[in-house]
Amino acid sequence: FWWHDLDIACVCFCEVQPPVDPARIVTSLCETLAQAPQPMTRYTSRALPIQATCMANLPEMVRIAKLLFQKHFPQDAPCTFSIQAKVRNHTKTTRMEIIEALAAVAPKTATVDLTRPELVVIVEVCKTIAMMSVVRDYHTYKKFNLEVL
């Protein structure tokens, strides 16, 4: 794995290569921490799995989202999803523009459920980079907040 400095306070990025799945790593970490009787992390408050990155513009984000949807959403069965977007140090695209654009290209069998979705599309925009993933158990593991597990 490799560490990347994003030049954003309190944010670091750890890159892994396929076949390692960042979502499985974070879910496994959360499972372990949820069962631990005492906190096991000292300097990490949240761990977000990032499965794809692109430039922070809507056409690129939509292109990457379509690839992630094909890979992670069931193609012939109904499912529920929500989109969690956060924009930091970026003024060209708003959170709502991202949510609306990605929801428009979601599979037709998927319906929006903001309270208990089966899948959550995470979108983090930091400066000129957009980072995305599709995960399960996002709310079960308190939005991957390691301090409250």
Image (spheres, rainbow, N blue to C red):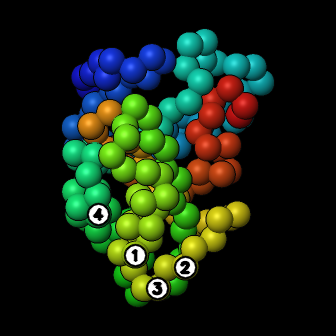
Question: If you read the primary sequence from the N terminus, does the residue marked by circle 4 or circle 2 appear first?
Answer: 4
Q: Which residue is mark 3?
A: 109
Q: Residue at x 73, y 31 (%)?
A: 148
Q: Residue at x 35, y 75 (%)?
A: 105
Considering the numbered disc 3 on the image, is that residue within a helix, a strand or a loop?
Answer: loop
- Amino acid identity at mark 4: Val
Asked if residue 95 is positioned above or below residue 30 in the image, the reply reads: below
What's the distance in space between the residues labelled 1 and 3, CA to CA? 12 Å
Sequence order check, earlier mark of 1 and 2: 1
Res 11 → quadrant: top left
Q: Which residue is mark 4?
A: 62
Q: Position of residue 54 (x, y in %)?
A: 23, 47
How far apart are the two marked residues, 4 and 2, measured between alpha carbons? Answer: 18 Å
Q: As rendered, which of 3 and 9 lies closer to the eye?
A: 9
Q: How far across and down, in percent of the image, does residue 91 sit? A: 37, 40
In the image, residue 60 sits, relative to residue 125, either above or below, namely below
Residue that mark 1 sits on: 104
Q: Quadrant of the N terminus?
A: top left
* Residue 28: numbered disc: none
| Residue 135 in sight from this viewpoint | no
- The residue beneath circle 2 is 111
Q: Position of residue 25 (x, y in %)?
A: 44, 38
Q: Which amino acid lies under the numbered mark 1 shown in the image of this protein?
A: Ala
Q: CA distance from mark 4 to mark 1?
A: 9 Å
Other-residue count near label 4 (Cα within 10 Å), few / some / many at <14 / 14–19 / ≥20: some
Measure the alpha-carbon separation of dots 1 and 2. 11 Å
SS of the residue at dot 1? helix
